[in-house]
Amino acid sequence: MIRYEYPLNERVRTLLRLEDLFDRLNWHVQGEHPYNHHAALVTLFEIADVAARGDLKTDLLQELERQRSALSVLRGNPDVEQTRLDGVLQEIDMAHAGIYRLAGRIGQHMKEDEWLTAVRQRAIIPGGLCEFDLPAYHRWLHEPTETRHANLRQWLAPMLPVRSGLDIVLRLMRESCRPGMQQAINGVYQQMLESGARPAQMIRVGVDEEFCCVPEISANKYMLNIRFVRSLPGESKVCADSMPFELTFCTL
């Protein structure tokens, strides 16, 4: 089953973007070819840009504190596995402390490095990092793999507390509710949302791989609309067949 996630507010949208970028960065950093590390550095710039929008540090600190308070109440509850609860609370404490210690805005350390600033300015230009544009960068790509690995880890290190914090928040969100099976009639599904219920932060839609359709999701506080469309290249039309799918409303 392929799962699609749809954020219902700007904060969750930012967390999902950062999660995707951090995953991509981790994959490229582990490579050894200069092209891997070129992609890793460009992705690092993207992370800094996304993280700089809004007050991400404050949002994460407040959410981690809220989750710590909510989970601490469960200490001693016989229906809760205490060892697992203690582990989650320890993770929250470590992530909270790491983010709290961050000085300045996220990614500020990259702006203070003249070499990184020069690379970043050229990176936003299509093809702007050719060897004749920035010889110093071309020279870095020819450094030993171990040197490039060390540099990338050094530039990434100040952002790791953010990665830990968003991982915890998204994991708790995804584990907050159980999925249910629904049926789309002629490729369309609609559901009225309960106004008095705790609002969902994210919607997850699971589609079996045998269906060559993807969900187009729109939602507000009153209504959820999902339209399944064909996903083949050059083709965009609503799936005419009725199909089952998995639906989850994730809350915090």
Image (cartoon, grey):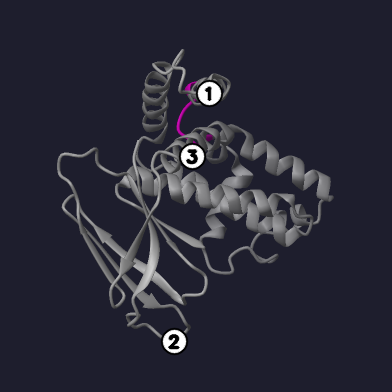
> Is residue 141 shown left or right of residue 200?
right
Query: How many tags in the picture?
Result: 3
User: Would you place residue 181 above or below residue 26 in this image?
Assistant: below
- The residue indicated by pointer 3 is 171
Looking at the image, which is closer to me, 101 or 237?
237
Is residue 119 among the parts visible in the rendering?
Answer: no
> Is residue 106 shown left or right of residue 201?
right
Whole-angstrom CA distance, mark 3 to mark 1, is 17 Å
| Element class at badge 3 | helix
Which image quadrant is residue 135 in?
Answer: bottom right
Which residue appears at 75% of the width and 59% of the height? 34
| Element class at badge 1 | loop
Say what amino acid the circle numbered 3 marks: Arg
Mark 3 vs mark 2: in front: 3
Which residue appears at 47% of the width and 17% of the height? 78
Q: Which badge, 3 or 1, is on the more N-terminal residue?
A: 1
Whole-angstrom CA distance, mark 2 to mark 1, is 50 Å
**Span colored in magenta:** 100-108
Looking at the image, which is closer to me, 239 or 22?
239
Is residue 235 among the parts visible in the rendering?
Answer: yes
Numbered label attached to residue 81 = 1
Query: Which x, y percent locates residue 60?
Result: 41, 31
Say what amino acid the circle numbered 2 marks: Gly
Which residue appears at 46% of the width and 28% of the height? 104
Q: Which badge, 3 or 2, is on the more N-terminal residue?
A: 3
Which residue appears at 59% of the width and 55% of the height? 42
Q: Is residue 102 magenta?
A: yes
Looking at the image, which is closer to me, 238 or 105?
238
